Amino acid sequence: MAETALTELQNQIEAIRRDAFAEGYAVAMKAVHELTSRSVSLQADNAAAPNGNGRAEHQTQSQPNQRTQPEPNKAAVPLRTSNPVRRSAPKRPTVQRAATGTRRSRRRQSKRGTNALMIQEILKKTPRAVRQADIRNALQRKGVSLSFPSIRHALGQLQARKAAKQVGNSNTWRYSAA
C-alpha cells in the first residue's frame, strides 16, 4: 500500500518536472525566435536578405526604405527550476578603508634568488640525494608553494654556482660544498 502511494507520488513528481521543462523550453525557444526575427528586420536598407533558397532578394522600388524599430527590452522571464527557493547573488562585505585609514597589506614579491636559497638550505640539511618532489614537499611543509619548473630553474642556478650537482643521469640532486 505504502509502496503504491510512493510510486504514484514519484510518477506525479516526474510528470510535473516534464511539464515544467517543456514550459521552460517553450519560453526559451520563443525568446530565441524573437531575437532572431529582430536581427533580420534590422538589416541595412539596401542589403540583400536571403529568401531561404540560397538566393538574395533585392529591395524593389515599390518597397520604401523602412526601418523597423526593435521592441524595447523586456524583463527576462525567469526559468522555473525544481528548487522553489531563488537565491540571490552572494553579497560581498563592504569595507570602508577611507574612513578607517587602514589598508590590507599585500603579499610582497620575494627577492631574486630566494627560491634557490630555500632549495639550497633543503639540500644542505639532507645527507642523501633528493628528488624534486621531495624538495617540493619540504618547501610545502615550510608553507612555500613552488612549481616544478621553478624548482628546476633554481636547481640550474645552484648548479651554475656549483652549490648543487645532479647525481649521475638520475633526477636526484645533492648539495655540493665546492
Image: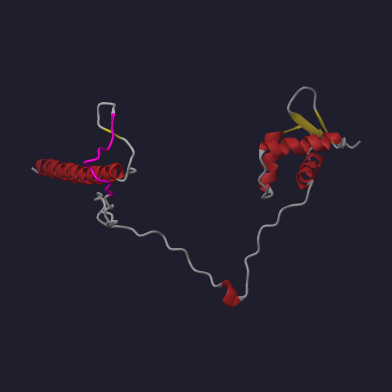
Find the residue positioned furthest to the top.
Answer: 169
Where residue 146 appears, as percent x and y from the top left, is 67, 43
Dominant secondary-structure state across the stretch colored magenta: loop
State whether residue 4 appears in this view. Answer: yes
The spot of residue 109 in percent (x, y) is 71, 53
Query: Total marks drawn?
Result: 0
Q: Residue furthest front?
A: 61
Q: Which residues are magenta?
A: 56-67
Which residue is found at the position 10% from the left and 44% from the top? 5
Q: Is residue 127 visible?
A: no
Residue 69's place in the image compared with 105, above or below, is above
The quarter of the image holding the C terminus is top right
Residue toward you, 98 or 128: 98
Residue 57 part of the magenta-drawn span: yes
Q: Tell me: 33 left or right of 6.
A: right
Image coords of residue 40 (percent x, y): 29, 41
Q: Is 164 situated left or right of 99 in this image?
A: right
Residue nearest the viewer, comparing 52 with 28: 52
